[in-house]
Each structure stands twice: as structure tokens, then as C-alpha cells.
Image (cartoon, grey):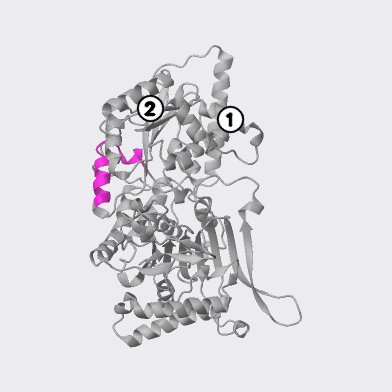
Amino acid sequence: MAIQLSHFSSSSTTFSSFDHKISYFSKWVTDIHFRRQLRNNFELKSTNGYPLNAIPMQDEGSVAKTLGEEVPFPEFGEANSMLSITVVGASGDLAKKKIFPALFALYYEDWLPENFVVYGYARTKMTDEELRNMISKTLTCRIDRRENCQDKMEEFLKRCFYHSGQYNSEEHFLELNCKLKERESGKLSNRLFYLSIPPNIFVDVVRCASTKASSATGWTRVIVEKPFGRDSESSRELTKCLKQYLTEDQIFRIDHYLGKELVENLSVLRFSNLVFEPLWSRNYIRNVQFIFSEDFGTEGRGGYFDNYGIIRDIMQNHLLQILALFAMETPVSLDAEDIRNEKVKVLKSMKQLQLEDVVVGQYKGHSKGGKSYPGYIDDPTVPKDSVTPTFAAAALFINNARWDGVPFLMKAGKALHTKRAEIRVQFRHVPGNLYRRNFGTDVDKATNELVLRLQPDEAIYLKINNKVPGLGMRLDRSDLNLFYKTRYTREIPDAYERLLLDAIEGERRLFIRSDELDAAWALFTPLLKEIEENKIMPELYPYGSRGPVGAHYLAAKHNVRWGDLSVDGLFLPAFAAGKICLDGFLLLYSSSLSKKFKDQKRFWWSGFEVLLSVIQI
């Protein structure tokens, strides 16, 4: 992990004794040497042994009018600097459930500097003690050192303070600045602002913070939560407004899925294991699937969700970012700019999304086990005539030499049968397989598959074909697996912990650059406009089901079977698959999907492919 070094103080540092000075210097040198060694162990190098460093991209037109410039020199120890973290929108759910617990976890594990302070800022009237009581209810400790948990909580809460103010008030941010200066006590000031607020007030907060509450001696950085606009135009406008007050290097656009352990491990798995990298291409990979499902609906958040929908909320950011990391070429180094450069190349190489390669759905009310589950439009915050998709499946293609012709399938939905996020890599069939007859007509049973389960129960496993012990020749599909809970005793850090630490250290590798954002919106904006302007009706699916049958049709169209039809390595029972197919096939016939076909013959043949795809088990 790249480490952001502190700055030399503008004033001379005084110590009580020479021995004390040597002690600080030794601690600093040891710490810096250790962290450099960690980074060098994973840094790609050229044949002459030197790191391969690409020239970072410069954003034209970026202007920092008021924020202090970052000085790339280390400070003599930590004692003369102060980290001030301001959580804007501190009374909201995200701050209470994710940001404050992540900050405490970093403090508990000794990742935060010696001198730091946390301020909550929101419109809600609240005292320091009331803030502490609120966030103390969500703080937890790591499972391996719980004995000193309460002491650490009390120490952390003593560093938490609150200031109430309007988001567009420069006067209130000036008051915040005075409080921060008082806590900083003349030390070198590094300030991080986390914007846990709706996007329509991003610019007001950045304007006020930059003009009245930025650091005069150290760095100032701003973490911006998604959504980053609704389309290409609004995204560009937001970036343009932010850059009136910030440089690109000061904007940290956060996508918490990039901070998940398995996403972080994706490049390690590929680039540090010889067995995988040669297979990472169209020559061996048949298709790649990115699957996201939640087992609950909007549950009161329908007002927000209805303005965005599942494509903007999940596919355009979370899944597309993971796709770019998965498909990118080998970067010249692990530097943030080198990695982000390769991701941008992938996004710019992608074929424009067509409506015929997309299926949208919306969950409806359903009764199961004597319990009733409401439909999407039953949410009182959702308009009764809403056609906003709560489910979407799409087939994407990358037009480059490595991935030409390989379908990248995405599927995301709410109110489905399970909570899951995973990447599934299905390899090609073995040419002239000697054991083909042992698999019967379902050749897909013999297909190797690599699965990275992001959540829950993080795991990596590879499906292989294996002989069942005995005198006969019976083959079995087995898993070579790495389950994180059984392999590693330490609890996996939350994604927000990793991303907050990276922002503090100035590591931008897992944050989204403005040209990445432009390329992502360029891919989805035409599709979104077509769906909304033509008022495409989503296919209804029952709450708690596996989603619209149209998704199976889409997969069959590209000669793919969704990998999540299996549970714990076993395929769905035949009667369940038959029911999915028979119920859904009638829906297909009567739905608007049939209008996509030029003639009835083609429609029925595609439906037959759905039948084969689901029922061959």
C-alpha cells in the first residue's frame, strides 16, 4: 500500500533532549523503511531492477483556488502534526452505520496517527456528548482483542466532537475551522472531509469547506460518495463544479465495493499466480459473470431509489468498476495512476450497450410461508405508476485482442432469493474431451469455473472434474476452495476501513478518477435514455424469487448459463428448474420481450434455448 508521507513543519521542531530527538528519528526511519519494504515486495520492476513508473495523467482545467498544496516532504515524526477528519452529514445512516465504526476500527488496530480528531457536522442540533452516545451504539471491536474494547471506545469517543451548521453557510464552516484550529494547537494540519450527504449539496459544502475550513499548512482532501450524477451530462457538470475548488488529486470518489477484500485480492490472484494469467483471455475463458443480489427491497428508501434505479445504483459503478479491474491489461506498476490508466482503456474499449442485450425487471408482492412481502410500488415513497427497474441483466463486450467475443454478463437485483455478490469465470469446454460420455448431454457439467465470492462468507473456489473413488468410472464435479473464515482467524476489515485509510495516506488506487467516470457514463447513458424515453416496462418477478425469466433468455442467447443456478456446488433440482422454465416461458411469450424479435420463429427458438439452459441439469 502506498504511504502518504507527512510534511516538514514550517517551524523548527524542538525536543527536550538530544536522546528524545534521536528516539523520534529512529522511530520515523524504522517505520518508513518497513512500509517501503512492504510496497517494494509487490512492486513490478523492469529488467534493470528499477520500478516502472508511467507518467500520471494531468487533468486540464483543474484549478485549486483556495486549498493548500500538498508538499511531498516528510515531517520529523508525528508529534508535530494533527489529522482532522470531518464527517459531513454525521447524523445520517451511512455515518452512523459505516463511517464512524470504520474510523474506530482503524483506531482500535492502531492505524490512525497519534494525533487525530473527529468532527461530526450536520444541520441537526446536537452536543458533543449526544454525538458520542449516538455513535457508541454502532462501534464494535476486532474479534482477537476484545479484552480492552471498552477502554479503546472511551478513548476514541473523547476525540469525537460535533458542530451544527447549514451545508451552504460559509459562516458555519468558519466556526468549524476555529474549532479545528483550537484542537490542532498550532500543529501542522491535515484535513479530511467525508461528504456523507445527498449529491445536490456536494458543491455547496465543497465551496464552504474550501474557502473557510481548509488547511493552511498541510493537505486537504474530500471523499465524495456516489451517485456521481445521473448521466454523462450531470456527471461532467458535477466534476466541473467541484474542480472550481479542488484539484483532481484532492477528490476521492469512493466506491465501497472496490474496498472489499476479494476485489483487492483480484489483481493479486491474477498477477502473482502463474497458473491464472496465461488463461486470462478469450482463448480459455468462455464468459465472465458479475452477480449482485439482495434479499430485501427498498424498505423506505424508495424515494431515493426511484430517482436512480438498479442500473445507476449498482451496475454503472460497483459492477463496472470490478469488470474493469478484472479485464485490464497488466499495469506497468502498482501506482494508482498506472492501474487507473489500464481501467480507463478497458472502459473505452467496450462495445456500446444495446437494448436487446438488456433485461429489466421490477419485484411485485408475494406471499410465502404465511407471510406477505410488499411489491416495489407498494412502498409509500414510490409512485404507483413507477417503471423504475429493481432488477437488470446485461451482456457487455470488450472490443480488444484479449477479450473479443467473450460475453461479460452482469446481473443485479433487489428482493431476490438470497444476498450475494460474486464473480464467476466459466472456462471453455475441453476440446475432444475423452470423458464427454460420462457427462451425458450436459457438457456444461464438465466446464471448469473459478468463483470469487465477495459477500457473504468470502471465498475463492475452482470447480474441477474428478473421479469418484471406486472400481467404476464415475466423475464428480468438486471444488478446490479457500474459505476465508477457516483459513484466516482475523476478521476481514470492512471496505470503508480500507478506503478511509487509503484516503488518509493519499493512496488513490481504489478511488475513481474523472476520466474513468466519463467512460463509465458514456457506456450507460444512451441505454438509460432509451429505457426512460420509451418507458420500457420492466418484467415483473415475485419478491424472493430468482428474478425475471428474461434474464435466463438473455444468458441463453449468448450460449451461457447463469452460474448462480447452483447452490453450494449443487444444481437446482430438476422440478424447480422446470417450474422456473414453464412459468417463465409463458411470461416471455406474453411480455414485451417478444417484440424484440423480427419473427415468431426466432422467438420460439430462443425460448427453446431458455428451456435447454435451465432444464439440462
Nearer to me, 608 or 507: 608
Q: x and y percent of residue 511 in the render?
A: 40, 46
Name which residue type carries label 1: Lys
- Mark 2 nearby-residue class (10 Å; few <14, some 14–19, many ≥20): many
Q: CA distance from mark 1 to mark 2?
A: 23 Å
Question: At 44% from the left edge and 36% from the top edge, which residue is drawn?
Answer: 504
- Residue 525, horizontal then vertical, whole percent: 28, 59
Q: Which residue is mark 2?
A: 163
At 32% across and 73% down in the image, what residue appears? 356
Camera sees residue 358: yes
User: Which contiguous range is marked in magenta?
Assistant: 234-252
Q: Quadrant of the C terminus?
A: bottom right
Q: Residue at x 31, y 75 (%)?
A: 592
Where does label 1 land, which residue? Answer: 152
Name the amino acid, label 2.
His
Please state the horizontal and vertical placement of residue 159, each as a whole percent of the image. Answer: 49, 26
Residue under the image location 39 percent in, 82 percent down: 606
Disc 1 vs disc 2: Cβ atoms closer than 8 Å?
no
Magenta stretch, main secondary structure class:
helix
Of circles 1 and 2, the one toward us is 2
Q: Which residue is at the far bottom?
A: 601
Q: Looking at the image, is 419 positioned above or below residue 433?
A: above
